[in-house]
Amino acid sequence: MLSTCHDSNINGIERFISGVSLFMSKPIHWLVVTDLDASLLDESYCWSAALPAVQRLRNLGIPLILNSSKTLSEMTELATALGTMTPVVSENGGLISVHKDSGLMDPNHVLVRSGNYLTEVNGLSRDFIIGLAHALREEQGYQFQGFSDWSIEQVSDRTGLSHSMARCSLSRHATEPIVWEDSPERYNAFADSLAKAGIRVLRGGRFLHLMGEVDKADGLVCARALYEKVQPKVDWKIIAVGDSANDLAMLEAADIALVIPHADGPHILPKAPRVVYASTPATKGWNDTILTLLTELS
């Protein structure tokens, strides 16, 4: 009898502790952090096929955060078209920008004003990166070309961007995209020389990106921290979406990694708590898989 009473008390305590834990646990809210080229955007830089998922995110109140190698000028135009005032992570994590009307600003944090956005530069300046890369090219005869070598017309031809968007793409602060035209062996020597100065080479979908020791994962962490500061009683979880090697760190920093396939190549293989593979490339795969995940999580 005594044993039965003791067991009953233990069960009651366990139920009480479980109830307290449930009461104290934070509600889960989701953020979607996405790459652009070949993910949200198709080969013509259009996102119309993703409109159903974008609208669903908006209806659910889930922030859509853009995280790309593109410049702030390019991305704020897209953010306006998407109707979002969420943080923008540009130049592969080199810039973190917050819309002045987003409610996420820290009034004590001094940031640089750029249009409607307040911006913080991470890593190294583009001027420093270009100066060293070009010095090595002159000294060692390395064969490569980058955005700083090209006119607006040449950037447009190489990227498929309109002239106005090519002009925006040239407005860089923390990265320099290049095309390597030399041997793999000499590339390794070039990359090693850059690394000694704190410059890393990140392979994107179209270009190699020379940049400081930051990446898209740093941008993801900064974006989540902004929401955590405003709503500390929320457990902010992240779905990250990407397709190429320069998205890998971002995907591995997420709770759910959504990998968009390439039509002509293998998947990247991130190590994340959960990895989901879209069945079709680019914008359609983005749309269909985000809709599926939202149905599951809501």
Image (tube, grey):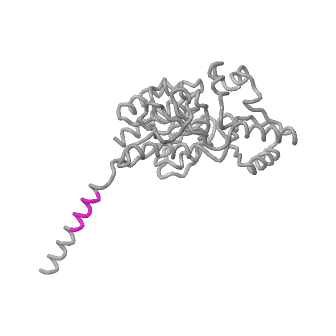
Q: Residue at x 63, y 39 (%)?
A: 265
Magenta stretch secondary structure, dominant: helix
Quadrant of res 104: top left
Q: Position of residue 23 (x, y in %)?
A: 26, 55
In screen coordinates, is 192 left or right of 162?
Answer: right
Q: Position of residue 83 (x, y in %)?
A: 44, 26
Q: Position of residue 216 (x, y in %)?
A: 57, 43
Quadrant of res 55: top left
- Quarter that holds the C terminus: top left
In screen coordinates, is 262 left or right of 199?
Answer: left
169 shown above or below 67: above
105 shown above or below 156: below
Q: What span is in magenta?
A: 13-21
Q: Position of residue 148 (x, y in %)?
A: 74, 30
In screen coordinates, is 42 left or right of 52?
Answer: right
For this rendering, which residue is in front, 95 or 190? 95
Query: Is 173 in the magenta?
Result: no
For this rendering, which residue is in front, 179 or 75? 75
For this rendering, which residue is in front, 244 or 155? 155
Q: Residue at x 86, y 38 (%)?
A: 138
- Residue placed farthest to the left in the image? 1
- Quarter that holds the N terminus: bottom left
Q: How many marks?
A: 0
